[in-house]
Image: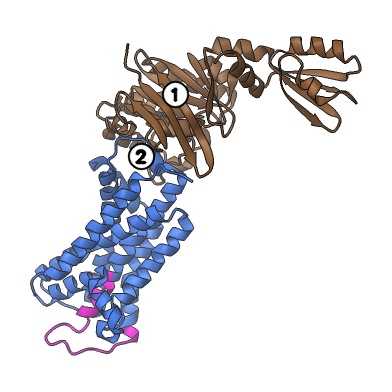
Chain colours: A brown, B blue
Amino acid sequence: MVEPMVSLRRVTRRFGDRVAVEDLTLDVAPGEAVALLGANGAGKTTTLELLLGLLRPDEGVVRVLGTTPRAAIGSGAVGAMLQVSGLPSRATVTELVALTRRLHPRPLPLAEALAVGDLEAIAGRWVEDLSGGEQQRVRLALALAGGPRLLVLDEPTAAMDLPSRRSFWGRVREYVGAGRSIVFATHQLEEADDVADRVVVLSKGRLVADASPDALGAAGSKAAAVCFKAGRIPLEALARLPAVERVEVERGHITLHTIDAERTVRVLLERFPEVADLSVARGGLEDAFLALADKVV
Amino acid sequence: MGAYVRLEMLRQLRNRDALLFRIALPAALFVFFRAALVEDKPSGSLPPDADAMVVFAVLGTLLSGIFASGPPLAQERASGWLRQLRAMPLPASSAIAGKVAAAMAFALPSVALVLVAAALTQGVRFSAGTWLELGLVLWVAAAPFAAIGVVIGLAVSDPEAAQGAASGAIIVLWVLGGMLTEPSDLPQALETLAHGLPTTGAAELGWAAVRGHGLPLVAVAALSAWTAGAAALGTLAWRRLGERR
């Protein structure tokens, strides 16, 4: 078997009383692009910081390229774009990219490192004068300038509009060829779907699903929130309807979170004809997670 | 490592506002205090303002060393840049060395300006060799202050609090170092403390230089110990940078 690029074995990390990542086991193979998908607080950032060695696990073992995360970083084989990372003031784009190259033993040529962030036109500017989008491109260039075998990106496109997002991932894909892996965090299903070979769904620090984007999409497409008015139906009865994961009541409106809208609605109307004002909203991410958690694990 | 040190120095020297303030202040204070409170101590053949000149040059190394390393480091930590650096193959020791070296780049012009002010306004005269030695020892004496600044910048996570901590450290080191009073005027316990402080050590280096004495080895040892100790603490703090909450 090929040695995994990243391997987490039963990793747990707590912050005080809060468990950020719990009993997480995960391998990333060379060449694989893996999305960590989850809502805020699901443990995505903690997972990425554990595999960068920025955090130490309370339990379990993290290995990167067959060694410790810190040793892997030290060898220059890892490039990272953290979720929150300012850039230092009074330095130009070129100076920062050049510094990053000098720190790594096998960097990209400078021109290529600038090109990967589409930075040629702003190479001489002070980084503090750049727009948010431009700074994000600088950070991508810094993550790639060292020629890493493993690229770690924490919600890299969170602040981008759709066209910027497309061109961002276009540039990343161009760079990531055979044998290089990407692990990235996102809370967007579409992004995971577009970019990743594999989607790992985290919820409350636990791995709830590990599937191909296709499987995720199939599960997500059936998930839905079914909303209606109904006076006197006992909530327990609703919770027992097929495929229902969760029931919410707000000001007389009942919402059923279901992993299979069709099955749920069919039985709902059959048993409770008094249901009124029924609407079905396409599955949100949360419903897709629940669906996956049920089906795929 | 060289690349990091070089960029850090460049970035420091581009900080014109801070540079002007920190470089000019000790020289300006020296001129002001010497004009306002002229009270020459008998000092043999020594030019009358030489000792005071050393004291204000030490203020230059102190201000430059601590202010140039501490608050900016806290700022970079708050912005997340230091964590990004932690995700790069930059050894902790190189990072600390880079910060200390960059802060010291600040100290050199600050010291030089005090010496120039002393020569121009107070008529302090020495041989070229003595000036050179004086400038050099006082500049090198900025190392412990820069290292202490690094520790402050890494230990105090809030940039404004770090600014306060840096100012506090400067005042404590300056006053307890006996820079405004004779150490013998301080209470006994403080006098003992004063002898171990890097401000005292730096001043002793300068006073020895103006008198043409050899290097005071006790002062050199104290400054080295402060530098090594603070740098070691800074390296430890750097290694823990990833941790949050």
Amino acid on which disc 1 is placed: Thr
Q: Which mark is nearer the camera, 1 or 2?
A: 1
Q: Is residue B48 magenta?
A: yes
Q: Position of residue B244 (x, y in %)?
A: 46, 44
Is residue B23 something one can see in this rendering? no
Badge count: 2
Is residue B28 something one can see in this rendering?
yes
Q: Chain of mark 2?
A: B
Give the image location of residue B123, x and y in percent.
21, 80
Residue B176 colored in magenta in the image: no
In the rendered structure, are the residues bearing label 1 and label 2 in contact, judged by CB atoms less than 8 Å apart?
no
- From this view, report whether residue A184 is shown above or below residue B199: above
Mark 2 surroundings: few (<14), some (14-19) or many (≥20) residues within 10 A: many
Q: Is residue B206 above or below residue A150?
A: below
Identified at 64% across, 22% down, the residue is A285
Residue that mark 2 sits on: B86
Do callouts 1 and 2 point to residues on the same chain?
A: no
Segment tinted magenta in the rendering: B35-58
The chain to which mark 1 is attached is A
Q: CA distance from mark 1 to mark 2?
A: 24 Å
- Of residues A19 and A159, which is closer to you in this image? A19
Residue in front for this viewpoint, A166 or B130: A166
Q: Residue at coordinates 27% horizontally, 89% vertically from top-left?
A: B39
Q: Who's the residue at 34% across and 26% down the image?
A: A64
Horizontally, residue A178 falls left or right of residue A233, namely left
Q: Residue placed at 21% from the left, 66% from the top?
A: B138
The residue indicated by pointer 1 is A25
